[in-house]
Image: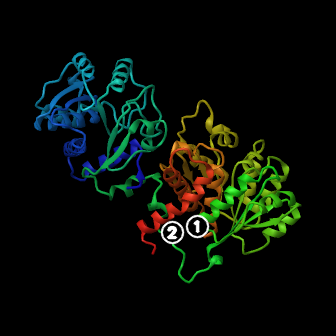
Amino acid sequence: MHELLTPLQMKKADRLTIEGGFPGIELMHNAGKAVFEVMRQILHPYSRVLVFCGPGNNGGDGFVVAQLADNEGFNVSVGLVCDPETLEGDAELAYDEMDLDLTSMDNMRAALEELGEDDVIVDALFGAGLSRPLDDEVLDLVQQINESPAQCVAVDLPSGVSGKSGEVLGEAVHADMTITFFRAKPGHYLYPGRAHCGEIVIEQIGLDDEVLEKVGPTAFYNCDKIWGDIPDQPAVAGHKYNRGHTVVVSGPKFSTGASRLAALGAQRAGSGLVTVVAREQAALVHAAHLTSVMIRPAERIADFERILEDERLNSVVIGPAAGIGRETQERVAECLSSERAVVLDADALMSFEEKPEHLFEYIAESESAGRVVLTPHEGEFRRLFPDLYDPTSTYCKVERTQKAAKRAGAVVVFKGADTVIADPAGNVSINASGTPWLATAGSGDVLAGVIAGYLAQGLGGYEAAAKGVWVHGRAAEIAGAGLIAEDLISHIPDVITELVQFLGDF
């Protein structure tokens, strides 16, 4: 279930299912039942349940939940933020079937003030299709819900969050749990919406997987479904040369740490050999720190060119503390003309800030089509693709990354708490592994190395980037609070061990 559906795509999936003979009201019954069954894990016999319903199908799901809770003997109150006479379609049918009287919104608000930690609020106001800010009356209600100590369960998506972009439309419910149906939406995993969802539960309610082909998902959740058929276990009869050779371009003598982090990241990801290429003074610094990573001096660009002529080299990382300027531009151009897979990070990107089209031209002329990866954080992305952040633009992060990848002709890893990975063909995935502790110096350098390590082993650019991002985030989760970049390197083997055991590579 790694496919993500926009609200419009989900609406199409519902329509196709109904046209195929599955009544819409039955889908609504199933959705309400699914929500109630999941709710059981937090309900106590004495829990009070407040169900807030809106004017659409999300409200219809809420009516079903309210009825089921009442049937089980819970103290249930259900409120509707519109005139019941305005209800239409399946929502109207669910309302007519409900054997409960509506409670006035004034009394619902008063009841909110009395709830405790063992009580439950059901947010069935607005689902993933919301496209405009909440009006003042509902906005006040959402704020009151958020102030309650009761646990909040959101139906489909917390009200106020865009299912397409994760944008908070003025204000949004902070749910402890969000129960969605068939497939998740991009808004479940894109910030700030992701922070409002709490635990995300995906329930199947009768839609057939065959409708996915007709719907045509355009985005995916980053998981092993994308890269899981790539073995992490080395071949029994293999050797280091089978596992690829990564080159990391170093910065000057007082800026060598970033390239070492990238080199060690590539090693831990499985690259059989890793070489750091540096000016002589920087090479001496590296020699004092590195043991299993090789070091090659390259004082001039001609020396660098000769090193890259070695056909045994598979991938190159350039950018971590490399320095911004003409020399880095020249080295980037040389990397891209070398027929090697290339990861462009940090200074390699910012060296082209004034003329990003020059970088894209180099990529277009590269022999490494499909195996060039750009890893910008938000500030770098804005500088390379300023028009995608135009104030009049309505692009979400997924669309920005897709458009950037197509323009650059490369895989783009748009880093952040909700890292998005896209390739020029339009494939895109949203990552959810990681922790806020990743916001520390050097973590991006490790990521660049990990991706390059997977590229060295023969992975395509999109797969290497997606897997690298996930492994990097999972290593952070294992490292826990207070991590520094070096901790990521030491925990990558733990992640690979998990993957080997889970995916059965032995």
| Residue 427 locus on image (x, y percent) | 52, 55
User: Quick one: 436 or 332, which is closer to the camera?
Assistant: 436
144 is higher (above) or lower (below) than 24: above
| Residue 350 locus on image (x, y percent) | 74, 45
**For the residue marked with disc 1, what is the amino acid?**
Leu
- What's the mark number on residue 29? none
Categorize mark 1 by other alpha carbons within 10 Å: few (<14), some (14-19), many (20+). some
**For the residue marked with disc 2, what is the amino acid?**
Ile
| Residue 401 locus on image (x, y percent) | 58, 47
- Residue 426 lies left or right of residue 285; in this view the side is left
Q: Are marks 1 and 2 in contact (CB under 8 Å)?
A: yes
Hey, which residue is sitting farthest front in the picture?
A: 288
Hey, which residue is sitting farthest bottom in the picture?
A: 237
Which element type, helix, strand or loop, lies under badge 1? loop
Reading the chain from its start, which is encountered first: label 1 or label 2? 2
Q: How is the image coloured?
A: rainbow
Which element type, helix, strand or loop, lies under badge 2? loop
Q: Which residue is mark 1?
A: 459
Which residue is found at the position 57% from the left and 49% from the top? 402
76 is higher (above) or lower (below) than 480: above
486 is higher (above) or lower (below) than 233: above
Q: Which residue is mark 2?
A: 230
Can residue 452 be seen in this snapshot?
A: no
